[in-house]
Image: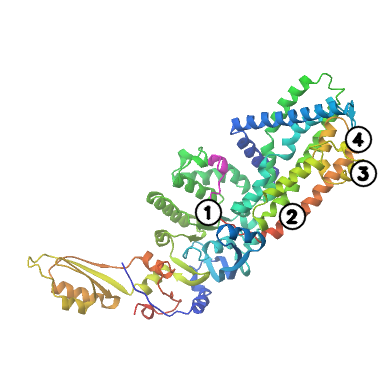
């Protein structure tokens, strides 16, 4: 197990690296946030206008837009950048070799880098979150509260860990297949579609909604965003966290198995 | 200098058996690295060239078995630097990767400081280092100082020891001014020096050096060689060095392991290779001009040895080692000599022939084989 001191050191280095290229940092932040809000805005404006309804699946228009704003704000904190594809790149290019020589586990090392990389995005979260709050006339009516923020914090942590762990065994497929970029895209798509990142889960048929709640995906977006917007009871929140953590253990075990089998095939190309 | 070496018979099995003899290690030095019949087989996919080949490969790929290392056995003792040489693709790096714990072997066994390297016990990883000349191991976007601080945490180096070791290494390699420059902005030589510091910060007892001077200019190569010698002197680690630069091998290693097509074909003293294969020496005499424009006594020269060069003011002869003294005396007596030299063939040339780079049909000597028996015929 990696020591806390080393974990923090690695995370701190990665955070510094993420802030080294500030032009890229801000362009990514602004564009990502703008696209994440503008597209749903136009889409749901059209849907609400066309349907003539004031509420769809329990969301009024403002509530729906706020849902997507929350997704846009939390997206980077949960999924991180493309660092996860760095695992398959390490295998493909042989850069994994250096980590195998160090007396530190590769998985915790990568997670420390992952956490370090997303840490600067909390600055973006505070800044853009402040801007959004400025435009929300009545935060309490929109469901925003300190209780929601407190409930969202552990849910975001679980979502981040779960998404990282889900990526890990997929990236380890690179031991067999070399290039696994498509699997990363597939995971992002699945997490977005089945986890509430593209559509609120309330829009799905009831049977699908109920079944999905037991899958790992809702813990990625649905749980933290719904907690933040005050859309979960305490029991729903606790159950969602428990399911998310349970999947963390299961997927971690699968990841370890895949990694151990795959590692036997590692050739350390490039040296 | 050209040396023709043909068919000196030395069974590879005998060479391998000799590998296990205790005399392979430096006298009294405990073996820190032990490999026994270590083997690695890869299965690689082959694809026919062109669009049709790519289309076919989508459905069916040809797999080819490649025995990268076969039954490699040897030991390395404390304070030894062993040169591992072989042509490209001979299996040197694969062997190093197995010993460093990067890849798993297909067969055989190895221990480093008593641990199996591919089991990656942290107690072992605390004591080994791998330097890859062709692959950067430091973090590209960070200054070297930040990388070293990270390694301090990874290896749990106490503050005072870290400071002392870093100061020592920085001073030895003269890179004090570059410590706070991003790695990617350093020259190749400076980067390699930083890689060396990074690898040695935790004072490893076993060091694997894979092409540490590749691509460096002569000054940087020399600086790194001198540093490695000093480091060996002061810390006595077991080192395995692979390099295509024969000067690295000549300057740093007293012992040589030659690997060819995955098999160790020689393991013994570097000097022994010279003694065994340098069956001839070259006798050169610069003559005082006679003004007669004639070539001096060709019939007498041919009796002394193979005439390499023959002009009015110079004579070069290739003479069997055992007849050098007589040939030298004859030349000195027969000519008016202004300058005189007896040259050994270059070690690099001999080794290059042994590893097969020049395509010579050569079987290297087994330990215990008499030098004369393996000389050119």
Q: Chain of mark 4?
A: A
Q: Can you see residue A145?
A: no
- Answer yes or no: are tags 3 and 1 on the same subunit: no
Q: Give the magenta part as a residue range.
A: B133-148
Task: Judge the density around disc 1: few (<14), some (14-19), many (≥20) Cα neighbours within 10 Å.
Answer: many
Earlier residue among tags 2 and 3: 3
Label 3 or label 1, whichever lies nearer to me, is 3
Q: Can you see residue A199?
A: yes
Residue A191 appears in which quarter of the rendering?
A: top right
Residue occupying the point 59% across, 33% down: A21
Label 3 or label 4, whichever lies nearer to me, is 3
Label 2 or label 3, whichever lies nearer to me, is 3
Q: Chain of mark 1?
A: B
| Residue B94 colored in magenta in the image | no
Determine the main secondary structure of the stretch shown in magenta. loop
Label 1 or label 4, whichever lies nearer to me, is 4
Question: Which residue is under mark 2?
Answer: A256
Question: Which residue is under mark 3?
Answer: A207
Earlier residue among tags 2 and 4: 4
């Amino acid at each position: 197990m990696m020591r806390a001191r080393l974990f923090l050191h690695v995370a701190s280095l990665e955070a510094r690296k993420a802030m080294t290229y500030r032009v890229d940092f801000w362009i990514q932040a602004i564009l990502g946030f703008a696209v994440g809000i503008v597209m749903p805005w136009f889409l749901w404006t059209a849907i609400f206008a066309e349907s003539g309804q004031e509420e769809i699946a329990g969301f009024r228009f403002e509530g729906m837009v706020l849902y997507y704003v929350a997704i846009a704000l939390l997206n980077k904190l949960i999924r991180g950048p493309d660092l996860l594809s760095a695992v398959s790149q390490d295998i493909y290019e042989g850069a994994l070799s250096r980590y195998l020589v160090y007396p530190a586990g590769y998985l915790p090392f990568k997670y420390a880098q992952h956490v370090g990389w997303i840490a600067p995005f909390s600055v973006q979260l505070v800044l853009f979150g402040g801007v959004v709050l400025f435009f929300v006339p009545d935060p309490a009516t929109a469901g925003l509260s300190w209780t929601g923020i407190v409930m969202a914090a552990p849910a975001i942590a679980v979502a981040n860990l779960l998404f990282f762990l889900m990526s890990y065994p997929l990236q380890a497929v690179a031991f067999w297949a070399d290039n696994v970029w498509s699997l990363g895209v597939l995971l992002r798509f699945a997490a977005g579609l089945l986890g509430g990142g593209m559509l609120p889960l309330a829009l799905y048929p009831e049977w699908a909604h109920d079944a999905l709640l037991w899958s790992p995906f809702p813990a990625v977006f649905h749980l933290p965003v719904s907690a933040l917007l005050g859309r979960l009871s305490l029991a729903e929140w606790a159950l969602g966290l428990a399911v998310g953590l349970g999947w963390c253990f299961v997927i971690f075990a699968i990841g370890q198995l895949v990694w151990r089998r795959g590692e036997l095939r590692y050739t350390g190309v490039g040296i | 200098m050209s040396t023709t070496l043909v068919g000196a018979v030395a069974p590879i099995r005998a060479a391998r058996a000799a590998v296990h003899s205790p005399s392979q290690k430096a006298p009294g030095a405990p073996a820190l690295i032990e490999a026994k019949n270590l083997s690695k087989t890869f299965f690689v996919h082959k694809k026919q060239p062109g669009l049709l080949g790519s289309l076919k490969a989508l459905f069916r790929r040809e797999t080819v078995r490649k025995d990268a290392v076969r039954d490699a056995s040897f030991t390395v003792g404390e304070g030894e630097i062993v040169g591992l040489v072989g042509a490209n693709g001979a299996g040197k790096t694969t062997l190093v990767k197995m010993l460093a714990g990067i890849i798993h072997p297909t067969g055989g066994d190895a221990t480093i400081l008593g641990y199996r390297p591919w089991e990656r016990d942290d107690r072992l990883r605390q004591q080994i280092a791998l330097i890859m000349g062709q692959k950067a191991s430091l973090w590209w976007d960070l200054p070297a100082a930040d990388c070293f601080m990270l390694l301090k945490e990874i290896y749990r180096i106490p503050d005072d020891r870290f400071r002392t070791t870093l100061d020592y290494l920085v001073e030895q390699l003269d890179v004090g001014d570059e410590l706070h420059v991003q790695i990617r902005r350093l020259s190749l030589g400076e980067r390699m020096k930083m890689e060396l510091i990074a690898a040695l910060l935790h004072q490893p007892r076993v060091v694997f050096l894979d092409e540490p001077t590749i691509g460096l200019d002569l000054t940087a190569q020399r600086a790194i060689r001198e540093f490695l010698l000093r480091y060996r002197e002061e810390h006595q680690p077991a080192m395995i060095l692979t390099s295509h630069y024969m000067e690295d091998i000549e300057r740093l290693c007293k012992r040589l392991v030659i690997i060819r097509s995955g098999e160790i074909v020689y393991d013994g003293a570097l000097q022994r290779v010279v003694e065994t294969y340098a069956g001839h020496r070259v006798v050169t005499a610069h003559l005082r001009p006679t003004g007669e424009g004639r070539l001096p006594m060709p019939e007498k020269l041919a009796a002394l040895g193979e005439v390499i060069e023959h002009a009015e003011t110079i004579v070069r002869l290739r003479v069997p080692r055992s007849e050098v003294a007589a040939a030298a005396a004859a030349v000195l007596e027969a000519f008016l000599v202004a300058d005189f030299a007896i040259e050994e063939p270059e070690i690099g040339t001999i080794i290059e022939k042994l590893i097969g780079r020049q395509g010579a049909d050569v079987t290297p000597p087994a330990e215990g084989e008499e030098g004369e028996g393996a000389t050119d015929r």
